[in-house]
Image (cartoon, rainbow, N blue to C red):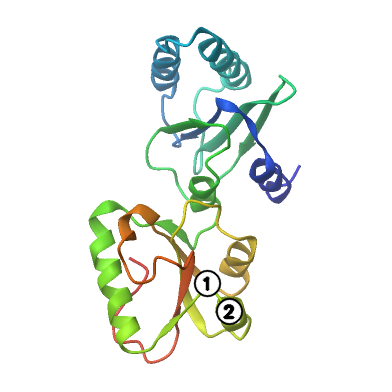
């Protein structure tokens, strides 16, 4: 199964609450100590039924990776979750970007935006220390009339006039942005929507920065 097919399955997967795990493992890394730490944390969950379900998911993950000494190249992304038919689905992906640290998330869906950050080279998540800088850039682009809002953004992307999309909601990044990040070298910046609750653009899930007449050296922070 290709990475694209796996990504589609991951995006559409919906399981039981807190029984869906996304794990990122760096290359050349002794991941066993961290998987044991995750298992230990799960074992401490008070809700007996949820604890048992998550431990089942961890058991499947461990069966898949227990004979691997270390992952190479860019590491690996592991997605495993208990589906609504009480069966465990398992997927693994080879990322396009090097995973820097061991991370894990559990919910009722896979962490699709985090996965895409490593699967697509032009997709990045804006970290806390850079949020203020990005908002300042947004403000400058608004003043200079170089912002394209949600209702027109697809039209401008097709015309190859947009350099960067700022995705500002908790929903998955739209497929068109991911596709264009490859085909048109479009940069996609994911910004936590809670960071801009009181900002003027809060009613837009995403906006775009026009390519021409840039007044800043770089907008992909």
Badge 1, how many Cα within 10 Å: few under 14, some, many 20+? many
Badge 2, how many Cα within 10 Å: few under 14, some, many 20+? many
Please state the horizontal and vertical placement of residue 2, each as a whole percent of the image.
Answer: 73, 46
Q: Is residue 14 left or right of residue 125?
A: right
Give the vertical position of 101 relative to 120 (above or below). above
Please state the horizontal and vertical placement of residue 186, each as a whole percent of the image.
Answer: 52, 72
| Name of the residue lying farthest toward the top | 48
| Name of the residue lying farthest toward the bottom | 213
Which residue corresponds to the image point at 58% horizontal and 17% vertical from the top-left?
67
Please state the horizontal and vertical placement of residue 103, each as a whole percent of the image.
Answer: 41, 34
Q: Residue 174 falls in which quadrant of the image?
A: bottom right
Q: Is residue 33 left or right of residue 112?
A: left
Image quadrant occupied by the N terminus = top right
Which residue corresponds to the image point at 55% horizontal and 77% vertical from the top-left?
153
Which residue corresponds to the image point at 39% horizontal and 70% vertical from the top-left?
201
Mark in front: 1 vs 2: 2
Give the tally of numbered discs: 2
Image quadrant occupied by the C terminus = bottom left
Question: Under tag 2, what secondary structure?
Answer: helix
For disc 1, the marked residue is 186
For disc 2, the marked residue is 157
Kindly indicate whether the residue at mark 2 contacts the one at mark 1 (C-beta within 8 angstroms): yes
């Amino acid at each position: 199964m290709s990475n694209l097919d796996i990504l589609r399955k991951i995006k559409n997967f919906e399981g039981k609450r807190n029984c869906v795990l996304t794990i990122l493992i760096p290359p050349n890394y002794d991941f066993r100590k961290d998987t044991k730490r995750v298992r230990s944390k799960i074992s401490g969950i008070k809700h007996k039924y949820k604890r048992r379900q998550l431990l089942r998911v961890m058991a499947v993950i461990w069966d898949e990776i227990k004979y691997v000494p270390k992952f190479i190249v860019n590491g690996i992304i592991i997605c495993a979750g208990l589906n609504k038919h009480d069966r465990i689905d398992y997927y693994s992906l080879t990322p396009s970007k090097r995973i820097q640290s061991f991370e894990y998330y559990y919910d009722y869906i896979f962490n699709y935006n985090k996965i895409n950050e490593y699967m697509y080279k032009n997709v990045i998540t804006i970290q806390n220390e850079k949020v203020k800088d990005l908002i300042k850039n947004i403000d400058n682009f608004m003043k200079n009339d170089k912002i394209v809002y949600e209702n027109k953004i697809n039209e401008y992307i097709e015309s190859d006039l947009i350099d960067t999309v700022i995705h500002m909601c908790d929903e998955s990044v739209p497929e068109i942005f991911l596709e264009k990040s490859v085909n048109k070298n479009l940069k996609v910046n994911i910004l936590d929507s809670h960071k801009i609750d009181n900002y003027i653009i809060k009613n837009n899930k995403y906006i775009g920065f026009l390519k021409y007449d840039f007044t800043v050296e770089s907008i992909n922070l």
